[in-house]
Image: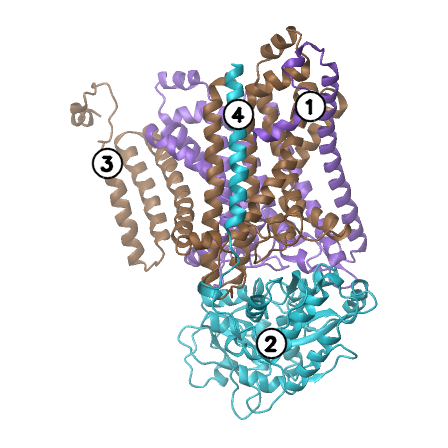
Chain colours: A purple, B brown, C cyan
Amino acid sequence: MKTDIEPTHTPAGTPPRIKARSTGRAGDKIFLALSRGSGIALLVIMAAIAAFLSYRAAIAISKDEANFLTAFEWNTGTEPMKFGIAVLAYGTVISSIIAMAIAVPVAVGIALFISHYAPRRLAAPVAYVIDLLAAVPSIVYGLWGALFLVPHLTGLYTWFDEYLGWTGIFSYQGGAARSLFTVGILLAIMILPIVTSVSREVFRQVPKMHEEAALALGATRWEVVRMAVLPFGRSGIISASMLGLGRALGETMAVATVLSPSYLINASLLDPGGGTFAQNIASHFKEANDNGRDALIASGLVLFVITLLVNGAARMIIARRKEYSGAAA
Amino acid sequence: MSNATITKNEAGASSLRQARLPRWTLPALVVVSAAAGAGIGTAAGLGNTLQWGLIAAVLFILGSYGLAAAVEGGRQAKDRLATSLVWVCFVLAVVPLVSLIWETVERGKTVLDGYFLNHSMEGVQTILPGGGAYHAIIGTLEQVGIATLIAAPIGLLTAIYLVEYGRGRLAKAVTFFVDVMTGIPSIVAGLFILSFWIIILGFSYSGFAGAMALAILMMPVVVRSTEEMLKLVPNELREASLALGVPKWRTILKVVLPTAVGGITTGVMLAVARIAGESAPIVLLVFGAAGINNNPFDGAQSSLPYYIYEQWQLGNEASFNRAWAAALVLIAFVMILNLVARGIARWKAPKTGR
Amino acid sequence: MKQLQRKNRLRAVAAGALAVSSALVLTACGSDDNSGGGGGGKAAKAGNIKCDGKGNLLASGSSAQKNAMDLWVKNYGAACKDTKINYKATGSGAGVQEFLQGKTAFAGSDSALKPDEVKNSKKVCTGGQGIDLPMVGGPIAIGFNVPGVDKLVLDAETLAKIFDSKITKWNDPAIQKLNKDAKLPSLKIQAFHRSDESGTTDNLTKYFKAAAPSAWPHEPGKAWEGKGGQSADGSSGVSSQVKQVSGAISYFELSYATANSIKTVDLDTGASAPVQATVENATKAISEAKIKGTGKDLALDLAYDTKADGAYPITLVTYEIACDKGNKPGTLAATKSFLNYVASEDGQISLKELGYASLPTEIATKVRETVKSLS
C-alpha cells in the first residue's frame, strides 16, 4: 500500500531532506493542485456517472409504452418496449424488510451478547469471527444459499404452510424454496455481521458510569441493558440497520442465485416469483439490446436513488448524534 | 423466599439476598429442552433437525422464564428471559454462519489441491471433473491490483484535500459526491462501465473494464476511511510542524501521513478485501475465459467471483465442486487481507495516539 | 523517530516488492495444459483439423451446445495451439445480442435470427449480414422427478397444459389416461421454465404451437410466455432444479438429463408407439428438416408435428451465427478454421455420446461449403 502513497512525493521533484531550506511554496502549490485535482477528478467521475445514467434512463422511459412505475411486465426486446418496475420495487422492498426484520433483532442480540453477556473469553473471539464474516464475498453466500439453504428450507416452509397458511402470506405450494422469503433470509444472514459489528461498537461506548449507576441501584442485567445501554445505543442501532439495509437493497448475485424470478407478485411470500432491481439487471443485461439496457439502467437508477435515501438517512442519524463517531468508518 | 435462601447458603449468600435458582438449572434446562425438542420432533415426524432446534430453543426460553418467575420473581424472570434470548440470538446467528464456512471447507477441499491452483479450465469438458482456477486467481489479482492503483491514490489525495485544505464549495461538493458514491449499487457501477466503455466507446471486454468498475466502488471507501484517520491526527502535531517553518505539504507528508499510516493502510486493505469479493460488476465486464490471460488490458479474463458464478451455473456435480473450491480460495484470500489489515491496525495503533 | 519511519518505509517497499515479485512468479507457474487430468482427458487425434489464424476467439450464446462446444474446443485447442476459443454459455438471446454488438466472433443460438436481428447484423457485418449455420441437433428432453414413477408418457396437449399451469397435479386424469399402469402420486406439479431468453424455450413453444395449438395460446418465442410455474437460469439451472425438487418437470437438452441422470418423458406423437427422447429418434425427426434460409443463410424448418414412427418431435438444431461477409479481419481465419472443423465429419461424429444428433449429410455438406465462403 505504501507504494501507492509514493507518487505524492515525486511531484515535488526534490529529495525532501536536502532542500529543507527552500520555502517549499512551489511544493505547496503542486501538492494542493494534486490533491484538489483528485477531488475534482472524483467529482467529475461521479457527475459523469450520474449524468450518463440519467440520460440513458430518460431515453428508456420516454420509449416506454407502459407505465414505468406500475406496469407488471418487462418486455424490452421488441418494439414498442413495455416495462415497469412495480414488481422489482415490491420484491426489493419486501425482501429487504424481511431481512431487516430477521437480522436487526438478532444482530442487536449478538452485539449485546458480545458486549454484556458473553463470558469474556468467548466474547473477543466471537466478535473477531463476526467481523471476519462481514468480509465473506456475496457470491459465496449465493452459492451456499442455492446449494445448501434452499434445499433445507422446504421443511420449514411446509411447516409454515401448515400452521400459517391460512394467512395467505405464508402459504406454500411445494417446489423449490426459491422465493422472496428465502432471499430475505439469505440477505439477513449476509447483513448480520455488519449490523452486529457496528451495534457492538456503539454498545461498547456506553459510558461505564451509567451502567454502574444502574447496577448500584440494584438493577438486574436486563434492566441495565434496557435503561442504560439501549437508549444510548438507539441511534447507533438505527444507523447500523440502515447500513445493512443499504447492502441488502443493492445485493445482486446472491439474490440472483436463490430466486426464481418472474414478473408477477405473489400473495404468498413463500412461493417463487418476483424479483429485485439488482437481480433483474444481473439476469437480463446480457440478452438486452440497446433499448433493453437503457431500461435496465432506468431501473438501476431507481435503485440508486433508493439506496441514496437510505444511506442519507443513516448519515443524518449519525450526524445528529455527535458523541458517537465510530459508525461512519 | 427463606427456604430458597437456605439452600443457597453454601455459596455464602447472606440471608438478605433474593432467592436464586441453583447454578445447575440452566445447563440442565438446556439438556432437557434439547431432548424434548428432539423428542417432539421425532414424535411429530419432522425430518428437519432445524425444526428440532427451534422447538428446543422455544422450550428453553419458556422453561427458564417459568422457573425464574416461580422461584425468583418477575424482575429476575425478565432478566433470565433476556439472557436466554440473547443466547438464542447468538446460537441462531452462529448456526448459518458456521454452516456456511463448514460447507465451503468441506465441499471445497474435495478438489482443492496444487493442480487446482495452478491449472486453468482450458480444454476441460465442464461436465467432467478436472481443471482449476489458476486463470481466475490471476484475473482477480490483476483486476483488484489495477483497481487499487487507480482508486487508492485518488482516494488518498481526495481525503487529504478534504481534511487538510478543504473549505468552501468545492470541498462540500466533493464530500457530497463521496457520500453519493458510497451508495452506488455495485451492479449499477458495472452497468455504467458496460454501456459507456464497452458499448459506446467500443472497447472490448477486459480485466481492465472490470477493474474500472471496482475502482469506482473502492474510491469512496478509501476516501471515507482515510478521512477518518487523518482527522484523528492531533492538530498539535500539525501546528508544531508549521511553527517550525515547515511548508504545509511537507508537514502533511512527513508528519500527518506517517502518523496515520497504520489506519490508512488498514482502510485501504479492507477496501481491497471488499472489492476482491465483488461479483456483480465483474460478471458484466470481463466476459470470462477458460484459459490463462495474463494481460488485463486485452481480451477476456476470468476472476474468482466470476469463476464461482460460472461453475455454479454449469450445474453439475463436478462444476459445483470447482465452485466450492474456488469459494474457499476466495474466502481465504479475503480473510488473509482482513487479518493483515487488522494486524497492521493493531501494530500501528499506539503510534496514532489513540 | 525519523529512522524508525525510514525503516518502516523500507519495510513497506520491501513488502510491496515481495508482493509484485510473487505475483510475477505466480504468472509464470500456471498452466493451460489440462491434458493430464480428469475432464481434460485425451483430445482426439488432430487428424484433419486445419489450423488457421491466431489469438483469442470470443463467442457466446446457447447453453444447449455448451457440452458439444467444450468437446470441440478441447479437440481444436489440442491441435491448434495458437488459437483459443472462448465460448460462454449465456443463453441464445444473450449470444445473439453480444454478436450484434460486435463483441464476439460468432454466436451460438438455438433459434435462427429474426428479421430485425438480421437487419441489425448489417451494422456489424460490413457489406454482409448475419447468417445461421446449423451445426448440431438434439432432442429437447422433458425431464421429470416424480417419486415412484420411472416411465412417463405424455402428449403435446397434456404437456402444453402442464407448462401453462392448467394441469397442476401429477394424478390428473389426463396424465393417468396416458399412463394406465403408473402409480401417479397426488403431488403438485412444479413446472420449471427458463428465466433467461433461450432457444430451447423457443423450440419447445414452437412444438406446442405446431402440435397442440389449442392448448398453447401463447406466441412461441425465446422468452417464456406461459402462465405460472417456476423459473431458473440456463439449461443447467432448470435441470438441477428438476433433480432437487420432487414433482418437478422441465425441458432441457438430452445431455443435461444424461449428465444428471434425470428421467425423461416419452412422447405420444400419434405414432404407433410412444417415442423416447434419444439421439437416434431425434436424428430421425431432424432428417425431415428443410432449409428455409435464403442465400447463404441455412436456417432450418423443423418438423415439430411429425407423426413418423420413432421420430422424436421436440428437437432443436443449434446454429452458429456469423457474418457471411464482413467478419472482423482479426478473427476471420480462426473462425473459419474452427467452424470448418465443427462441421467436418470428425467434428460431428464425436458428439453422439454427449446426447447430440449430427446433421443430415446433405445439410452438413452445405454448411461446409458455406463456411468455406465466409469472408
Residue at 70 percent of width and 65 percent of height:
C96
Q: Residues within 10 Å of mark 2 (few under 14, many from 20)?
A: few
Expressed as whole percent of the image width and height from the top left, the position of residue A183 reads 53, 51
Expressed as whole percent of the image width and height from the top left, the position of residue B218 reads 62, 37
Q: Under tag 3, what secondary structure?
A: helix
The foreground one among B244 and B263 is: B244
Q: Residues within 10 Å of mark 1 (few under 14, many from 20)?
A: many
Disc 2: host chain: C
Identify which amino acid the numbered label 4 is placed on: Leu
**Mark 4 to mark 1: distance in Å?**
26 Å
Q: Under tag 4, what secondary structure?
A: helix
Judging by the rendered image, the residue that carries numbered circle 1 is: B161
Judging by the rendered image, the residue that carries numbered circle 2 is: C48
Judging by the rendered image, the residue that carries numbered circle 3 is: B25
Disc 4: host chain: C
> Do the residues indicated by labels 4 and 3 lie within the same chain of the protein?
no
**Mark 2 to mark 4: distance in Å?**
59 Å
Identify which amino acid the numbered label 2 is placed on: Asn
Q: Relative to A307, is B251 above or below?
A: above
The reply to whether callout 1 and callout 3 are in contact (CB within 8 Å) is: no
Judging by the rendered image, the residue that carries numbered circle 4 is: C10
